[in-house]
Image (cartoon, rainbow, N blue to C red):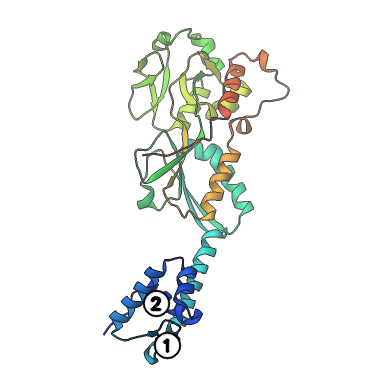
Amino acid sequence: MKRIDDLLGLRVFERVVTLGSLTAAAQELGISLAAASKRLTKLEQYLDVQLIHRSTRRLSVSDEGQTLYDYAQRIVAELAQAEEAILQKSEQLSGSLTITSPNSFGRRHLVKLIAEFKRRHPDISIQLLLSDSIQDMIAEGIDVAIRYGELPDSRLVARRLLNNERILCASPDYLARYGTPKALEELHQHQCIIISRHTEINWAFPSHTLHIQQAISSNDGEAAHVMALQGMGIVLKSYWDVAEDLMAGKLIQVLPEQAVISAPINIITLKNQHQPARIRLFIDFLLSSLQPMHMHKEKPDRPRCQHQNGYPTLIERRRQALKRSCNPITNT
């Protein structure tokens, strides 16, 4: 038993009969006259019947063609309804949204933003997965990932969210007890807190790489942050993570003139030309909400020029980085 699986041929046939013209059908479907004629002939050859009688002046439908036309009208109409339903669903602000992020960034900033996004769009179902490990977005069904650095996966697209400047810092209590280092080499004389499963790591600076060993270590960035607040040592942290503690004087920047090599924070999505509206809207929301100067506002009662830890210099660098923070980049 033959089964018609040529949907375009069926559409051509339905449009030709409805419009009474092969030329009009081709124009409406956006194909050439030759392509439309070829599709119609192929359909007739497959069914082994003549559906339309052609002459130089007019077209007429055969009995077999009329039978097929009655069914074709319903099929084409239902296909159009299905396409419209899918289009509306992809554009309406509903459905599910799965997001993954590093633990510390997710807890400190993303949860608040997701709560605001959910208030604006209550019909969107949101799942947040916090993990410091890289996850397979396709296998895990993840729509948006917040990650550090570039990803060597051509199936993904990255847009820069933040420049992620990193700084060395310690508590005032620790520096009062052990002194403030004046050069990178002096870090070997201090207790350093590293984020690693091991007790040694390399800290990368433009001038050279410093090997830190016999350090205090934790595999959790938030725990390392708390250790620094408790006066246990000097930690290397992202600026966005410690800015509030710098402003409050709970942490002091160490070696503020020393730049640290760091990777940007990117928004990662799958390479998809037909991205649902809810994903596009969430990305735009993040980009507009996580501007560096928006995320870390200065206290009006604290003059920048009197700050003891070099923070004004850092603020100025953040101002310069603001225009670069959201430039789109594509992983290849």
Label 1 neighbour load within 10 Å: few <14, some 14-19, many 20+: some
Type of residue at label 1? Val
Viewer-closest of 210 and 153: 153
Residue that appears at 41% across and 48% down: 271
Q: Residues within 10 Å of mark 2 (few under 14, many from 20)?
A: many
- Taking the spot 43% from the left edge, 29% from the top edge, the residue there is 263
Q: Position of residue 231 (x, y in %)?
A: 51, 19
Looking at the image, the residue that sits furthest to the left is 1
Dividing the picture into quadrants, the one containing residue 219 is top left
Work out which quarter of the rendered image holds the N terminus and state it.
bottom left
**Number of marks drawn:** 2
- Mark earlier in primary sequence (2, 1): 2
Is label 2 in a helix, a strand or a loop? helix
Q: Amino acid at mark 2?
A: Leu
Residue positioned 45% across, 31% down in the render: 221
- Nearest the viewer among 126 and 151 is 151
Question: Quarter holding the C terminus?
Answer: top left
Give 109 or 94, whichever is nearer the viewer.
Answer: 94
Q: Tags 2 and 1 in contact by the CB under 8 Å rule?
A: no
| Percent of width and height locating residue 68 | 40, 86
- What residue is shown with label 1? 61
Tell me the SS state at disc 1.
strand
Q: What residue is shown at x 53% (from left), y 26% (from top)? A: 239
Residue 188, x across and y down, in percent = 39, 11
Q: Which mark is residue 111?
A: none
Check the image and report above or below for 172 versus 14.
above
Which residue sits furthest front?
Answer: 56
- Residue tagged 2: 10
For residue 285, side relative to residue 159 (left or right): right
* Rendered position, 210 above or below 69: above
